[in-house]
Amino acid sequence: MSTHPLLKVEISQLSIAERIQLAEDLWDSILEQPDKLPLTDAQKQELDRRLERYQQDPMAGSTWEAVKQRLGFPE
């Protein structure tokens, strides 16, 4: 699927904040129809593996706050 050249020019003229918002809006529109986004068998297996690992030790992972701090995101 190719993007119309005019659309690329229009997007490039948006501010960074506007492009981020556009990306979020696009993602939200995809999430409104989760049945249209099928998982592969490999993805299902990975999700099952992660769920099993979490159920074995729910405290083994990191909180979202800890991940953001480790990546240097502002508070």
Image (cartoon, rainbow, N blue to C red):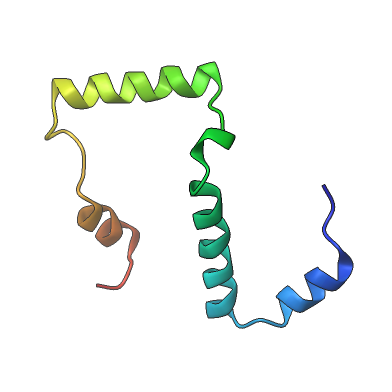
For the residue pair 11 and 58, the one nearer the viewer reads as 11
Residue at x 57%, y 78% (from the top left corner): 18
**Left or right of residue 44: residue 73:** left
For the residue pair 45 and 65, the one nearer the viewer reads as 45
For the residue pair 35 and 63, the one nearer the viewer reads as 35
Residue 15, image x, y percentages? 61, 83
Count of all numbered marks drawn on residues in the image:
0
**Left or right of residue 14: residue 51:** left
Q: Is residue 35 above or below residue 22?
A: above
Q: Is residue 60 above or below residue 27?
A: above
**Which residue sits furthest right?**
5
Residue 74, image x, y percentages? 30, 73
Residue at x 33%, y 67% (from the top left corner): 73
Residue at x 58%, y 59% (from the top left corner): 26
Q: Quadrant of residue 75?
A: bottom left
**Left or right of residue 38: residue 54:** left
